[in-house]
Image: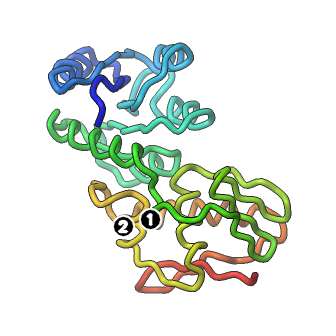
Amino acid sequence: MRMKMKILVVDDEDKIRNIIRMYFSKEGFTVAGAASGNQALEMLEREQFDLIVLDIMMPGVDGWTVCREVRARSQVPIIMLTAREEEVDRVLGLEMGADDYLVKPFSPRELLARVKAVLRRTARSAVPAEPDAPLVYKLIEINPRTRTVTICGMPVSLTVKEFDLILLMARHPGRVFTRDELLQRVWGFDYFGDTRTVDTHVNRLRDKLNKVPGCPEMIRTVWGVGYKFEVEQ
């Protein structure tokens, strides 16, 4: 990992921002802080960051809004922080495009480990290098080079992980991938989450595909095992 990567810490608590800045600076990171969602969005307009540590519960513009705004224009990695250990918060964060999730109070060492893990995953291609010729099935085209999916000529807007999931499975039609396999192949061996992350992303991917008129069912659930890509060519 190259040194002096830039991290933006968004939290309305000065103490949290200062602790993270002190700890991460010792590890060779450049750390900037934003005390509000508005300030974070303004900073993101002016500067490039390698990763965002984002608190959810902030007055005014909250973390959900910041995450949504960031994902509308960027795939910069996001680790969300929250004081509530509720599954609905974690699932919503992942659905909105967050890369990881950490509950307060947390250890700076654990946050550092998660940051490094996310940066390692984003520094390499999530899906192993394979021929990048477009995959063409019935009504659907998946283009690895441009990272685009079209159905009946209509583009489908996917997140990085959603595209990686469909590309991996479409390259091996009919093969059943377990949730653990998908977690390892798409998120990486060092991912801190669990297999529910896979279910969340697959469900969101299906919803996006099914919104296109005429889209055939292509990602099938194999109960008790995982998922497979199956569609006529």
Please report the residue visible at 50 percent of the width from the left and 45 percent of the height from the top: 97
Can you give x and y, in whole percent of width and height, for residue 180 in the image? 35, 72
Q: CA distance from mark 2 to mark 1?
A: 5 Å
Q: Tell me: residue 229, above or below residue 28.
A: below
Measured along the vertical axis of the image, is residue 4 above or below residue 186?
A: above
Please state, as top left, top right, bottom left or bottom right, where the N terminus lies in the image: top left
Residue at the (56%, 17%) spot, across then down: 45
Residue under pointer 1: 198
Residue under numbered circle 2: 195
Q: Amino acid at mark 2?
A: Thr
Tell me the quarter of the picture where residue 195 sits: bottom left
Q: Horizontally, is 150 left or right of 72 in the view?
A: right
Q: Position of residue 201 (x, y in %)?
A: 51, 60
The reply to whether discs 2 and 1 touch (Cβ–Cβ < 8 Å) is yes
Crowding at mark 2 (Cα within 10 Å: few <14, some 14-19, many 20+): some
Residue shown at 74% from the left, 71% from the top:
136
Amino acid at circle 1: Val
